[in-house]
Image (cartoon, rainbow, N blue to C red):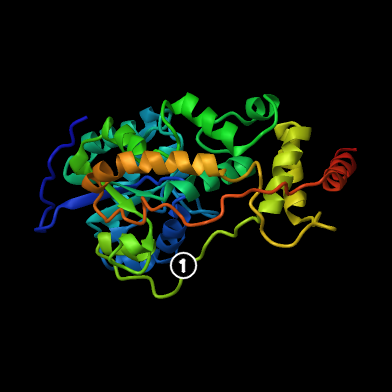
Amino acid sequence: MVLRPPLPSPGSSSPRQVWLHIGLPKCGSTTIQHHMAETYEQHLQLGLCYPQRHRSPDGYRNHIPLARMAAAVLPAALTEIEAEAERHSCHRILLSCEHWTNAFRTSNLAALVQALQQRMPGWQIRLVAYFRNPYGFAESSYAQFLRAGLFGIAKPAFFAAGPPGIDRYLRCFEESYGFPLPSLLSFTQMLLAQFPRDSLILRSNAPADLETPDMLSDFCNLLGLPPPEAAARRNSRIQPRKLAEIEYVQTQVSQPVYMQLRPKLLKRDFTRGAPPGPARGSSLHLSAAMAEDITRRLEAERRELAALFATRTDMLCAAPSQDWGRAELLDEAARVRLRKFIRRQTA
């Protein structure tokens, strides 16, 4: 795919730009989206439009409606987005949705870029992706998969295939994508195979790799916006014990039933008699052997990642210093309570 050079915007020495923030998943996208939605009016005054057209009105307030749109109707949607920006005299447009990388093979990202080239030829296109240290990325990805799915891995087939766990999840990802999930270089190569290098801006989300205090400040700086005034909202984290409960329940019921049970499952406390502390779950977290494999891969990828990224990559490629031991978080008494919960809720 060839991206056309920008044409100057009428009456301005600066090119008009469309920024596509494409994720990656579990790398702080919701923090960016929340801030951009909250500061919509202020940023309009600075020439940046985070379009309300084809953006979710609540929840994450990202552009998932646009990301799930059929290619044939993208030109009409872009006409509406461009009209919103021009109505406010904005020379920059920001579209944000991690679905473009979460479902990269089946998403409309390539079709969207092509539609932008054809419908808005005077606008320069930039794609921005943030990456996370692969140890936390692997574990957080599995946690998200357990909660609501991720990377298009079929949950019914996954839970029907035997005892679940992060090791099998990582194998499923590699079988589907053709490369290991913790391989940051493979993710960048997947993007570079579709889009020219000079259109992609690859960045670490580790604060120590950035010139600003955090990822959101870095993103604002990248777009020429003032830094956020207050600490950004973060998604609430689910404790490992609760994740273990979520994992176990999905071995007992179908996915439609799990989705019905999930709200009450998240609220209900099943920890009676459970050991204190957020122990690392035996099926939820990386083992020492898995961590060693990631370390070896990072050593092989480190130099090329540093050459491709627009930020430093020291902490992005750093191996955590920690005990990789894992514990069984659910005993049989806990499983009995969970099975009773399922029976009561599905009676």
Q: Is residue 327 visible?
A: yes
- Tell me the quarter of the picture where residue 211 sits: bottom left
Residue 200 lies left or right of residue 150; in this view the side is left
The residue sitting at 80% across, 57% down in the picture is: 274
Residue 289 image point, x, y percent: 53, 40
Q: Quadrant of residue 41?
A: bottom left
Tell me the crowding category of disc 1: few under 14, some 14 to 19, or many 20 or more residues within 10 angstroms, Cα based.
some
Q: Nearer the viewer, residue 211 or 217?
A: 211
Measured along the vertical axis of the image, is residue 199 above or below residue 252?
below
| Quadrant in which the C terminus appears | top right
Q: Which residue in the rendered view is the most extreme toward the bottom?
A: 229
Residue 195, relative to residue 273: is it above or below? Answer: above
Q: Position of residue 266 (x, y in %)?
A: 72, 52
* Residue at image location 36% in from the left, 37% down from the top: 187
Q: Quick check: 337 left or right of 134? A: right
Q: Quadrant of the N terminus?
A: top left
Picture residue at 67% right of the left edge, 48% below the top: 243
Q: Looking at the picture, how far across and down is residue 248, in whole percent?
A: 74, 40
Q: How many callouts does the rendering have?
A: 1
Residue 93, compared with residue 69, is above or below; it is below
Residue type pointed to by label 1: Ala
Residue at the spot of label 1: 232
Q: Position of residue 150 (x, y in %)?
A: 54, 38
Q: Is residue 1 left or right of residue 314?
A: left
Q: Is residue 126 visible?
A: no
Disc 1 element: loop
Of residue 282 and residue 343, the one placed in the foreground of this image is 282
Q: Residue at x 72, y 46 (%)?
A: 328
